[in-house]
């Protein structure tokens, strides 16, 4: 029984190694590489490139929570790629004056907000939420 377990384990390892070999081959790396050399941000770079080509990018509920370091960098890249090239529409529950604290790091916050707000058309809503009003009408 132990021998059977070893054979099954060996087969599982062989299949994992084959799959890893295929992934490394499909990654089309320029040189021989190992797992540690794989750039997992490559998929993210592709996504950021696609976002930069969208005609009108709409981001709903912007800055609802504090941004992490990677989120700050990614947002900066999106804003940089789209600045004065393609329109971006943001909706937020927070006033613009509170966006810097949600972004966090002051230098990146300045860069992001400069690109978002330069030549922006701002519409600030006042009053109760439409959802709240609809809830009262139906209740």
Image (tube, rainbow, N blue to C red):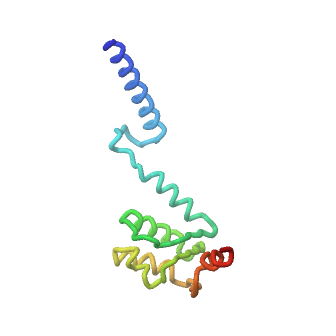
Quarter of the image where the C terminus is located: bottom right
Relative depth, front residue between 49 and 56? 56
Query: Which x, y percent locates residue 97?
Result: 44, 85
Number of marks drawn: 0
Quarter of the image where the N terminus is located: top left
Horizontal arrangement in the rendering, residue 36 relative to residue 15 (left or right):
left
Relative depth, front residue between 29 and 12? 12
**Quadrant assignment, res 9:** top left
Query: Which x, y percent locates residue 90?
Result: 55, 75
Look at 68% across and 74% down and name the residue there: 138
Look at 55% across and 84% down and name the residue there: 119
* Residue at far right of view: 138
Query: Which x, y percent locates residue 126?
Result: 57, 87
Look at 43% across and 37% down and name the residue there: 24
Above or below 25: residue 87: below
Above or below 90: residue 4: above
Relative depth, front residue between 16 and 25? 16
Above or below 10: residue 49: below
Horizontal arrangement in the rendering, residue 128 relative to residue 71 (left or right):
right
**Quadrant assignment, res 99:** bottom left
* Residue at far front of view: 139
Horizontal arrangement in the rendering, residue 22 relative to residue 138 (left or right):
left
Query: Which x, y percent locates residue 81?
Result: 51, 68
């Amino acid at each position: 029984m132990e021998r059977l377990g070893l054979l099954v384990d060996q087969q599982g390892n062989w299949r994992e190694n084959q799959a890893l070999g295929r992934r490394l081959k499909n990654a089309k790396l320029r040189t021989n590489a190992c797992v540690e050399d794989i750039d997992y941000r490559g998929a993210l770079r592709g996504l950021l490139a696609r976002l930069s080509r969208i005609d009108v990018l709409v981001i709903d509920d912007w800055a609802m929570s504090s941004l992490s370091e990677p989120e700050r960098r990614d947002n900066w890249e999106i804003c940089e790629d789209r600045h004065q090239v393609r329109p971006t529409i943001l909706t937020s529950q927070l006033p613009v004056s509170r966006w810097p604290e949600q972004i966090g790091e002051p230098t990146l916050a300045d860069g992001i907000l400069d690109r978002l707000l330069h030549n922006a058309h701002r519409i600030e809503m006042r009053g109760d939420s439409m959802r709240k009003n609809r809830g009262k009408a139906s209740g």
